[in-house]
Image: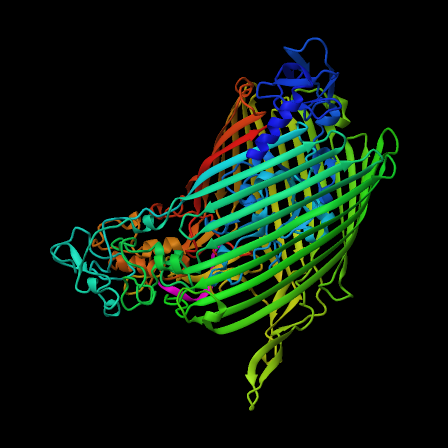
Amino acid sequence: MKKISLVIAFVCFAMSFVVAQTISGTVTDESGEPLIGASLLVKGTTSGTVTDIDGNFSLAVPANAEVLVVSYTGFATLEYPIGSETSGVTIVLSESAAQLNEVVVTALGIRKEKKALGYSVATIGSGEVEQRVESDVGRILRGKAAGVDITQTSGVAGSGTNIIIRGYSSINGTNQPLFVVDGVPFNTSTNNDRNFVTGGATASSRFLDLDPNNIAEISVLKGLSATVLYGEQGANGVILVTTKNGQGGADAQKGFEVTLQQGIARTEVANLPDYQNTFGNGFSGNFGWFFSNWGPAFDVRGSNGIAEDGTVEHPYDQDQYAAAFPEFQGARYPYQPYDNVGEFFQAGTVYNTSVSIDRNFGNGISLNANYSYLDDQGFVPQNTFAKHNAGIGGKVDLSNGLKIQASLNVVASDRVAPPASVGFGSNPSGPSVFANVLYTPRSIDLAGLPFQNPIDGSQVYYRRGSAIQNPRWGLNNMFDREAINRYFGNVSMSYELTDWLTASYRIGVDTYSQESRREINKGGSQLADGQLVTTQRSNTIVDQVLNLSFDTDLSESFNLSGVVGYNERVDKFRFTRVSSSQQFIFGLFDQDNFIEHIGSGGVTDEAYRGVYASVTAGYNRYLYLTASARNDWSSTLEAANRSILYPSVSLSFVPTDAFESLQGSRVLNYLKLRAGYGTSARFPAPYTTRAILASATNVSQTPGGQALNTNSVANRLGNTDLNPEIIGELEFGVEGRFFNNRVGIDVSVYDKQSSDLLVDLPLDPASGYRTTQINAAEVSNKGIEANLNLIPVKGDFTWDITLNFTRNVNKVESLADGVEEIAFAGYTNLGNFAIPGESFGAIQGSAFVRGPNGGLLVNAAGEYEATNDIQIIGDPVPDYQANWINTLSYKGLRLGWQFSYTAGGDIYSVTTATMLARGLTTDTDFDRFLPLILPGEDAEGNENTVQGYAGDYFFAAYFGADEGSIFDGTVVRLREVYLSYDLPSSLLDKLPFGSASIRFTGENMWYYAPNFPKGVNFDPEVLSLGVGNGRGFDFLTGPTARKYGATLSLTF
């Protein structure tokens, strides 16, 4: 910082000798409204400034300066002569019809007029992404674009995020969209070392490597008409990210500009249950060191296991702890409530520092360099995420028509997270911190009791005769670590062959290495002998594009534009893994400190080649017909099947430009009708067409003791007849602006059909194989997306409203002959299934048995009966989703918020079931000894009259049939709220800054899920199955987070 200050001081000192005068004034539009952020540049120099929130400016100009170049988005650039009048100058900019036509980024980075597009494109500017307390770009985009469904796996710092555009269209393949950064495909994989059962849900997604403060613009291409030029890679939609260094500093408002941003935020758990503090450990009203909280009331004395002095036997008064804790043997323990779960979590802190330098030399050469550092401390100890981002980009426009642009980004990050295996309200399926903490009985002083045996380091806890693990021991002895080193960038060149024909070439590289470590000390209840798993991954994408683009007027009425090109992409993936068990020395995580070792590794190479063409014919700037096609060749298929052609056609018609009678109206300002049909494909994973040979070393020995290497064939039978999955989508849309552009609409309806989907077909094990893959399934997505923009008030005080709405009906149309259902996520007896005629991902599990009259069947004990087989018990697909984004601004002051609403979508919630079954939340704070009668009927159809104990009924109902854990996921949420202030020029004149602003932001500050029990306080926005095709499941894998903080931004 000191070096930067010295440079600025030197520049200012040098300039003082050549500045002869200062010109000041205001820049307005034709109605007199000030234009905020208008650019003023002394022609022929790099000296410039921008207007403040009142449209005012003040600029020191050289003695020989003659002209100011004044520009503002949507207005014609003006060259203003510098005369004798230098103060109080008023510069008026006029709207330009050519510039008012919005230009958006489309496939391959091609910029087109939005009115010429026959498909929907959502654009998110840098102002909607930067200066956020959230560092995950995927989560920042939640609710910003209709048709884009974004779900987090949990609130753990650095955890994964699932992004789905227009529904799921593949059963076994990926449904994640393609990220393209500065024109280059960007790997956003979520690399799991393990499945969801043993903690894979908390793995991070690689778009976490992007720096939100370095993003200039994001475009979301949703339909196949928009993504066809990306071929198979764009089958699930495309998210185009343009970085600031990818622009090479060309948008710098002044010749030299430095922007500093410093953010600080607080992270808290958003959804801890509201615990009752009336009852403690035990069951049936009697005390006991059990999991459950159905024991006596805390005011009981002299009965039910409670002594007259209100104490019970100490939880560590156990023979197994006698040597380690002699002080607790025969000791008594106060029977009272503790804030044990609340004290387990902490308030984390997030620091985000960034600096960006733009240099516009004014002669077609520009440069941008940026750096940022993120330090994210999660809401539990031992959860940290630290990331360094650095980037540089440059651009050269030569007078001979040659343009060169290049950028390079470097990312280095380290993450530590607690393991979060699946839990069911008792011991989890693997190492987990969260699965045991939430149902801690209220009478356990979790923070005050020791968690580790001082003799051998093993865990200690209250539960007798059971191996339930102390969550504090887990925090301090179980770690999932991750280190990322990443480089991505590109070099592009273009040359204007003629005034209508341009040739361009771009090569881009995205490569990263990832080192993952799972470290578990011995002495826990899961993996009691300890474990060390180290995984080394590397992934490299090399992408090349050669284009020939054209844009020519055939006549005064006809225009022809388009592109013909070639694309080649090579993906290389390598991994090695060593899994070691039986730790020797406690606390030492080195492979040599473990006895048993299992090594594995793999290599995957993929190559894609494609040729494509797109031609747009425009008539009188109101009718546009675009025809596109791409042919791809993939290395993952056999030669006979690896070539596929996917065409697309779209039409755009602008009646307000076509008919003079519609022009000049203050009611209807703009109307566009569009239609498009696009196709795409999805290739199978590598090596599915052939049998795979696996090699293993030191598996067995000869009688002489020599090690033998063995080879084996995988249990999947290769299918040489595999074809790509085929997708076709029909889309219609309308866009309009009304009442002097105060009202805007954008509505799309689509019908997407996916056929020849790849599914696994079971085989008779006698064949030597268990499964093979075939093309034999169909899935449909039909939906509507609507955006409404309103400006009720405009002026010094402005009110902007954006509403978006999404409804998508996602169904399985058919499966292979003889296949009734496919379990593709979760367990085979409790998970997401593909069933013909049902919603994609229908939840199946055990159900409550129904009686003769359709009511729930109650047995002789008065409890519900569960089915022995699985049935459909829930539909995870929401009925619709909506967002309300609101901004109130008065000069430099802005107040904004975003409310999100999800209607429907069932969730299987272990958290909710456990809290109720174990009597922990305020929902169970009632007179527990009043007899209850469950609503239902007996085997003869008579109304149930059997009375029973509340604890028995709650336990049986929520730990019984899976159907009892299904809840409607409707939720309304205050997604974001912020207050920002830009300093006016009157204050900036006294400071060394060109602009200064401060922003206060809160995210996930409030939510309401009306169909969950109130005391559980459950947040439905979790994804315990991890990033992928599964949804609608909560397995105690971690709560969600609430963040709030402030960001200071300075420009000079």
Taking the image as shown, residue 846 lies to the left or right of residue 891, namely left
**Above-or-below relation of 77 to 681:** above
- Based on the picture, tell me whether residue 872 belongs to the magenta stretch: yes
Circle count: 0
For the question of whether residue 39 can be seen, the reply is no
Q: Which colour scheme is used?
A: rainbow
Quarter of the image for residue 845 reads: bottom left
Quarter of the image for residue 777 reads: bottom right
Taking the image as shown, residue 612 lies to the left or right of residue 927, namely right
**Above-or-below relation of 593 to 561:** below
| Residue 816, horizontal then vertical, whole percent | 63, 65
| Residue 235, horizontal then vertical, whole percent | 67, 52
Q: What's the residue at 64%, 67% (across, down)?
A: 773
- Based on the picture, tell me whether residue 994 belongs to the magenta stretch: no
Question: Toward the viewer: 651 or 196?
Answer: 196
Question: Toward the viewer: 773 or 89?
Answer: 89
The residue positioned farthest toward the bottom in the image shown: 703
Residue range corresponding to the magenta coloring: 865-875
For the question of whether residue 674 can be seen, the reply is yes
Quadrant containing the N terminus is top right
| Residue 584, horizontal then vertical, whole percent | 41, 71
| Residue 828, horizontal then vertical, whole percent | 50, 66
Quarter of the image for residue 835 reads: bottom right
What secondary structure characterizes most of the magenta part?
Answer: strand
Taking the image as shown, residue 406 lies to the left or right of residue 972, namely right
Question: Toward the viewer: 811 or 184?
Answer: 184
Quadrant containing the C terminus is top right
Q: What's the residue at 21%, 52% (across, down)?
A: 336
**Above-or-below relation of 737 to 266:** above
**Above-or-below relation of 849 to 408:** below
The residue positioned farthest toward the top in the image shown: 84
